Amino acid sequence: MAINAVGREIPEEIKGVGELNPYQGAFKTVPTGNKMSPNISMQKRGETKVLNSLEEAIKKVGVRNGMTISFHHHLRNGDYVVAMVLDTLSNLGIKNITIAPTALFPAHKSIIKHIKSGVVTAIQGSVNGPIGRIASEGVFDVPVILRSHGGRARAIESGDLPIDVAFIAAPTADIYGNINGVKGPSACGSLGYIVADAMYADKVVAITDNLVDYPVAPISIPQIYVDYVVKVNKIGDPKGIVSGTLEITRDPLRLLIAERAASVIEASGLLRNGFSFQTGAGGISLAVAYHIRKIMKQHSIVGSFGSGGITAYFVRMLEEKLFRVLLDVQSFDIEAVKSLIRNPNHLEMSASFYANPHNKGCAVNNLDIIILGATQIDTDFNVNVNTESDGVLLHGIGGHMDTAAGAKLTIIVTPLLRGRIPIVVDKVITITTPGETIDVLVTERGIAVNPNRKDLLQRLKKTRLPLVNIEDLKKEAEKMTGKPEVPQFENKIIGLVEYRDGTIIDVIRQVRK
Amino acid sequence: MKDTAKIGQSGTLESSDILVMVQLSPDQNGIRIELESPSKKCFGSQILKTIKQTLHNLGIMNAYVKAQDRGALDCTINARVETAVKRALKFKEKGDV
């Protein structure tokens, strides 16, 4: 066992995974060597890439027991592709598959039957809800490896995560394998998360319900990476793929938090021409964007870019010329999809472009401000977004640790309690994002600044914002709720939280019944 | 249900509230609590303690309590249990709860 830089015990080696490198600090790992090189292949003139069935494709690419296959989650809770591929593998009697999804959703719970029958025996990638729960109960022999969006792209490019076959849900594909996500009945917008898979997997299969003549335009994933194209009836349910326009929260408590976060941004000195900004699609985040938009209009500020998962609200800010460019790795709603088609300043970006720390520069490095949530935050500002207060693994990392490390100002917005559960605690159950990359915590009971950010503290002291010590927030929460009982764990490690640079920041253990 | 049973209910299923149903009947021996809560692992025993304490303070020695918690704080649990008990004590045949 080694103790890593955030004080967590990391085993030296895990069976089925190999040697582990303990986390040393957010910017300590210096990569060496060469990138992974995918195989060379050849497509003869006149040969077709279009196959009649998924079964044929699986046979042609040669999926065998023990292989690693990957998927992307741009179809979100409407995705049919993961289920149809695993069902077909199961029918063909293929077992012992590692899946490497960019994320899983509650809609993917049919995977559970393939886990129980031994078709799927390991997961490298985000898990969510029901699959996280059975992982927490110890169903896998090999721990789930959780990676951020940037960390996943890094792992693929570096060879840490070799992928045998990538199955790409393609809203539109032409007969020679060019793909885009913006057209077709299952349009989802950006295809950013699957780009590394397309480039580095040994074999790539596009699965589409909108097969068109050659060549399609625009092209997000080009023909040079795609081996086969399969036409199916439906790749997803549009209702689950894109949401309607997300509403700004009306909860007064959350609105107060958002208003304060906006005031922190204003006081930070970063809200000026050229300003870059990212938020999630959550209620508080969107409300922060509402205030930022108001301030930008008031002072005629033109930002450089908005990034990440793009919502209608950011599209509106682009159209109002409050931002020059949107960098879109995932389009959350139908407005974002439409904007990606029509607006040349709305750019699709890959996960590596977005957040991979080991390339020649990713977008988050140029980010001024990121607004993030937390399931728990501790008095060292470490954030947990993976495990719930009962210790169960229920969420992926997303871009949390990437944007926190990249942005000049990382703001966590959260109410002090969720129901009776305190959010500010002594020690988070799982460290997802290290405290050294978190600058401010904004709650309804006060704003806590990371003591490392003396410059920011000085600026905020000049305002009338309610500054508090994070320890006092923790005490205040506990005074209201009582001291929570700490969840009990077994010895077995069921999850590894990999920091974006490939080191291990924490482990997740099996929950005790 | 025995027609001699007295029932009182209080609270809602809104977030941060608790819905408490108290049944006082002569054949109930001691306190029996059925608790459903999203924070059962962290606060289950504390919630049960609070319910028992409130019943005790009201002099209730025999009751069946069904509590559907949605993350309520102790003060809320206190108030909901007390109100449910008082409504149960006023309970009339076919009366409102």
Image (cartoon, coloured by chain):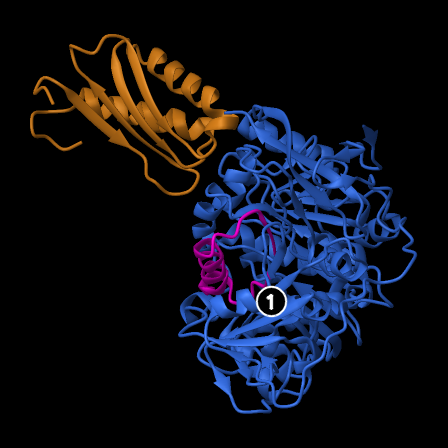
Label 1: which residue? A61
Instruction: Locate the N terminus of chain A and report the quarter of the image it occupies.
Output: top right
**SS of the residue under disc 1:** helix
Q: Chain of mark 1?
A: A
Region in magenta: A71-100
Q: Is residue A129 left or right of residue A289?
A: left
Q: Residue at x 86, y 44 (%)?
A: A25
Which chain is painted in orange? B
**Residue B45, image x, y percentages:** 46, 19
In which image quadrant can residue B91 be found?
top left
Q: Residue at x 62, y 84 (%)?
A: A319
Q: Nearer the viewer, residue A229 or A459?
A: A229
Regarding residue A308, the answer to whether it shows in the image is no
Q: Nearer the viewer, residue A1 or A114?
A: A114
Q: Amino acid at mark 1?
A: Val
Q: Is residue A9 magenta?
A: no
Q: Is residue A72 magenta?
A: yes
Which chain is painted in blue? A
